[in-house]
Image (cartoon, rainbow, N blue to C red):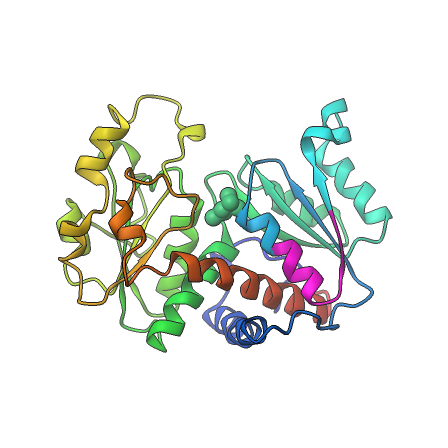
Amino acid sequence: MKHKDLLGLYTLEAEEIGEILSLAAKMKALVRAGQKSLDSLKGRSAVTLFYENSTRTRTSFEFAAKFLGASTVNISVATSSVQKGETLVDTGKTLDAMHTDFIVMRHPMGGAPTLLGKTVKAHVINAGDGMNEHPTQALLDMLSMLEAWGTLEGKTVAILGDIRHSRVAKSNLYGLTKMGATVRMFAPRTLMPAGLDCMGAKICRSREEAVEGADAVMGLRIQLERQKAGNFPSLGEYAKYYGVNEDILRLAKEGALVLHPGPVNRGVELTSGVIDGETSVITDQVLSGVAVRMAVLQLLGEEEIC
Ligand code: CP
């Protein structure tokens, strides 16, 4: 990789995304085969620094680092010196002083990992920054799709839900379009930000238009913690008019993949029948997450800092 840090897919070239996905596919095969004690990052250290809740991302980064032989430490912001008023930059400098090699950070403010990356020697990996990007989530989504199809080129992915607040949607848009896929987006009008068409998205006026003939359908979590106003009347109404159910899914290509970054609100963004359906790869996405994070750690760790 050409960069010290992984901050987003907006700034990555298709070749770099391809390199990560290629290594991640190998890592996934190794983990599937039970090979979880590699030593390519032996002697390195990784800290996960999460200012927001997480199950999948934090756990999979920790497993990924451990599977590659690195030592890992989790910082719980709720019980750290952040609560005593320490700034992000000072926390970063403190971790740098301990010769930390990787800082994996999630933060409610867009751009926070960029600031940290400029401040510390450690490789900073963005594990989700506000409404901006969640690059490893999009990479793992792409890995699951790539494994099913063999290519992303020429495929159509429909992304439905709370696009406005979704860093997952934005990273997928940047990544998938760079890899030659078409991204259709549909959201309640209050949850669709302006300008994504200029970034390559095809903005749709209905669920049907988004899903018709698509190769994959991705639901998004409603980001209730980021809603500043009543953007939709109720969860029931959201599910009825904007969620993905079996009838809507039937409009997609036969065998269309179903994805969701998790955590999923069953019966709201997707019905249980869709979540647990035969073409759902939601569980596979979790394994892809471990593999992608192994690949990112490996590639950042082995490159010279530019
Ligand atoms: N998809 C995702 O980021 O999940 P977590 O919030 O559980 O990490």
Q: Nearer the viewer, residue 45 or 37?
A: 37
* Residue 303 picture quarter: bottom right
> Percent from the top left, x then y, of residue 21?
50, 71
Foreground of the two, 196 or 88: 88
Residue 133 in sight in this render: no
Say above or below: 278 vs 237: below
Rendered-image quadrant of the C terminus: bottom right
Q: What residue is at 72 percent from the left and 65 percent from the top?
A: 305
Identify which residue, 212 or 7, lies in the foreground.
212
Residue 261 relative to residue 207: left or right: right
- Quarter location, residue 83: top right
Q: Is residue 148 visible?
A: yes
What x and y, as percent, mark residue 61? 62, 55
Q: Quadrant of residue 31?
A: bottom right
> Position of 113 compared to 180: left or right?
right
The tally of labels here is 0
For residue 152, side relative to residue 108 (left or right): left
Q: Quadrant of the N terminus?
A: bottom right
Q: Residue at x 73, y 70 (%)?
A: 304
Horizontal and vertical percent for residue 286? 48, 57
Q: Is residue 29 above or below residue 68?
A: below
Is residue 49 covered in magenta? Answer: no
Placement of 145 over or under 60, stated as above or below: below
Segment tinted magenta in the rendering: 61-73
Which residue is drawn at the image coordinates 36% and 78% (left, top)? 150
Residue 190 higher or lower than 140, as above or below: above
| Residue 70 among those drawn in magenta | yes
